Amino acid sequence: MASGNGWYLIGPLIAVGLVGFLGAVFWRMGLQWTTVREPDVAGLSIFGEPEYAEYEDYGLLCPAAVTADAEVADDIRRRLGDAGIRATRTYDREGRTVVLVFAEQLEEARRLAL
């Protein structure tokens, strides 16, 4: 059996070419690898942006404050806890920290978050 003619390389070359082609198609369609980017918001946003509430759904909880700094969010949670308001925190799609409270305590929580 002659192995010097190079036919055994055809299968792997086709596979590599197909993977490269599919990668180029997916890249062109906008399916690039997602990268973690730095949050654009500096400081604290108490009332949030109007479009912010459209995309995020937290069920019974409402965002009382949005901040780029997790320590600020922890301080707000402690302050709300001292006032008897139950609060938790989570992260949004941009990596910002969101302090969440129940809807009936939202206005008071926003006043205390200042």
Image (tube, rainbow, N blue to C red):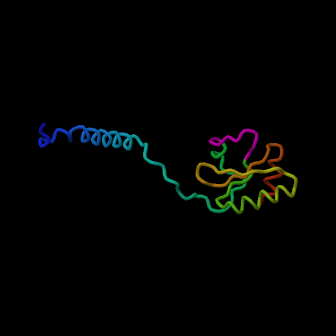
Location of residue 89 in the rendering, given as x and y in whole percent from the top left corner: 72, 52
Q: How many marks?
A: 0
Confirm whether the magenta stretch covers residue 102. Answer: no
Location of residue 34 in the rendering, given as x and y in whole percent from the top left corner: 48, 49
Location of residue 39 in the rendering, given as x and y in whole percent from the top left corner: 58, 57
Confirm whether the magenta stretch covers residue 61. Answer: yes
**Quick check: 60 left or right of 37?**
right
Identify which residue, 107 or 33, lies in the foreground: 33
In which quadrant of the rendered view does residue 97 lie?
Answer: bottom right
Residue 6, placed above or below residue 66:
above
Q: Residue at 64% across / 46% down in the picture?
A: 52
Q: Residue at 79% across / 44% down in the picture?
A: 102
Residue 89, placed above or below residue 29:
below
**Quick check: 4 left or right of 80?**
left
Q: Which residues are magenta?
A: 54-62
Location of residue 23 in the rendering, given as x and y in whole percent from the top left corner: 35, 42
Q: Residue at 52% across / 54% down in the picture?
A: 36
Q: Residue furthest front?
A: 1
Q: Quadrant of the C terminus?
A: bottom right
Q: Quadrant of the N terminus?
A: top left
Q: Residue at 83% across / 43% down in the picture?
A: 104
Identify which residue, 87 or 65, lies in the foreground: 87
